[in-house]
Amino acid sequence: PFWKLVLKQFDDLLVKILLLAAVVSFVLAIVDGASGFEAFVEPGVILLILVLNAVVGVVTETNAEKAIEELKAYEADVATCLRNGRLVILPATDLVPGDVVEVSVGA
């Protein structure tokens, strides 16, 4: 699901440290009695950077998943291999170590 992909972007030690830094900065701004927009600029910027990082991560991972799916379309269903001295056509999933596979261009 999409939400798991988003949460996965925050499952990194550096990101967790930055989240903690934003929370600490926010708490310190409240404890110091700071008022106005300037008091919350630092935690806001940290959170904005983390959100942008998550967006870039989600887009990159989504594009990578699509590329992998497209590459799977090129995967061969059958293979021609040399077994027991003769060429045999069999499902690619039945290939075992030691099979000599015939490789050809196209088709």
Image (cartoon, rainbow, N blue to C red):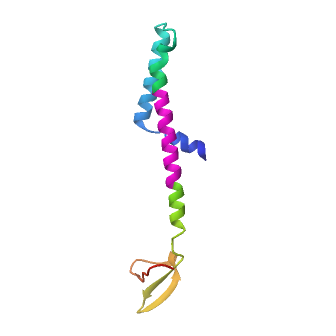
Instruction: Reply above or below: 42 against 86.
Output: above
Q: Can residue 43 be seen in this view?
A: yes
Identify the residue at image location x=47%, y=37%.
53
Please provide percent x and percent y for residue 46: 45, 27
Instruction: Reply above or below: 65 against 41.
Output: below
Please provide percent x and percent y for residue 15: 43, 34
Identify the residue at image location x=42%, y=29%.
18
Q: Is residue 88 magenta?
A: no
Q: Relative to the observer, which residue lies in front, 76 or 70?
A: 70
Q: Relative to the observer, which residue lies in front, 102 or 16?
A: 102
Please provide percent x and percent y for residue 94: 50, 78
Q: Does the magenta stretch include residue 52?
A: yes
Identify the residue at image location x=47%, y=33%.
50
Identify the residue at image location x=46%, y=23%.
22
Dominant SS in magenta: helix
Please provide percent x and percent y for residue 17: 41, 30
For residue 35, side relative to residue 13 (left or right): right
Picture quadrant where residue 66 is located: bottom right
Instruction: Reply above or below: 80 against 70.
Output: below
Q: Magenta segment, which residues?
A: 46-64
